[in-house]
Amino acid sequence: MNYQSNHTIQRIRTPEELDDVFYHGFFEVYSDCFSDEPYFQRFSLERVKEDFYAMMSHGVFLCLRESNGRVDAFVAGLPLQNHGVLKDALEFTNHQIDVNVIASYWYHSEIGVPKRLRGKGHARRLWDEVLRLMPSGYIKILARTHKDNNDSLKMHERFGFVCIPGSEHIVVDGDYDNPDHKPEDDTRVFLIRG
Ligand SMILES: CC(C)(COP(=O)(O)OP(=O)(O)OC[C@H]1O[C@@H](n2cnc3c(N)ncnc32)[C@H](O)[C@@H]1OP(=O)(O)O)[C@@H](O)C(=O)NCCC(=O)NCCS
């Protein structure tokens, strides 16, 4: 894909930089990415701040920024050991995660591009940068997505992930700050690369 854009990628490393991206529309972009089908999620600002503070501290959190500072897309990941999804990963991946080398698994936790900017290569650019910045020693990368999220499934496939057979499971404690929006069937699947 020919990628042309005026955006720059910024790595977020400090609480001040975190505040700055929230000031420049990060929360709105994040909400836009997960508010529709198949997620219908609603988040609290505090919860999202907390999650990205953890990713910034333990892993890699990147934002794609317009020349005026506006945040237009994001990606974040961290060592699997540092993420709350570890328990589900061990439970639902049918022993395909080798617990003896769990320290070598990275968790590709978040990636989002708002609807108006999709299909232009922004996710690819962010992903390539994550791979470049990921500390050495991470041999496998785990991800999780909704079983019906076609864009995400296709993107992960292009990024070299494969679905882990039999890893479908229903998420019962998703981020639904507004319970009215909780879908009846929030079935996710784990994917692995490497
Ligand atoms: C998934 C998402 C991040 C893709 O962002 P994007 O900027 O449109 O993706 P890109 O244009 O960079 O495409 C990345 C790759 O995936 C492929 N791809 C993306 N969407 C696709 C689709 N619907 N069908 C086929 N391929 C697709 C592209 O062809 C591209 O492959 P290439 O780099 O090898 O050429 C975006 O749709 C999104 O934010 N969705 C909502 C949030 C979400 O589901 N996040 C992932 C789950 S955590």
Image (tube, helix red, strand yellow):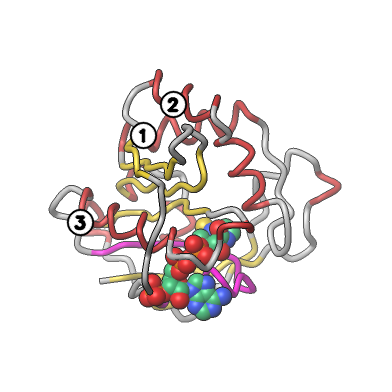
User: What's the residue at 14%, 54% (across, down)?
Assistant: 137
Q: Which mark is residue 18?
A: 2
Residue type pointed to by label 2: Leu
Q: How far, Cα to Cα, is label 1 from label 3?
A: 17 Å
Range of magenta residues = 140-157
Residues marked 2 and 1 touching at CB (< 8 Å): yes
Q: Position of residue 73 (x, y in %)?
A: 49, 48
Residue 164 vs 24, above or below: the answer is below
Q: Which mark is residue 56?
A: 1
Q: How far, Cα to Cα, is label 3 from label 2?
A: 25 Å
Residue 47 vs 79, above or below: the answer is above
Residue type pointed to by label 1: Met
Foreground: disc 3 or disc 2: 2
Q: Is residue 7 magenta?
A: no
In this view, the residue in front, 98 or 68, is 68
In this view, the residue in front, 175 or 11, is 11
Q: Position of residue 26 (x, y in %)?
A: 55, 36
Q: How far, Cα to Cα, is label 2 from label 1?
A: 8 Å
User: What's the residue at 60%, 43% (across, down)?
Assistant: 29
In this view, the residue in front, 101 or 129, is 129
Sooner in the amino-acid sequence: mark 3 or mark 2: 2
Sooner in the amino-acid sequence: mark 2 or mark 1: 2
Q: Is residue 144 magenta?
A: yes
Residue 77 visible here: yes
**Residue under circle 3?**
138
Q: Residue furthest right?
A: 180
Q: Residue furthest top?
A: 16
User: What's the residue at 69%, 58% (across, down)?
Assistant: 39
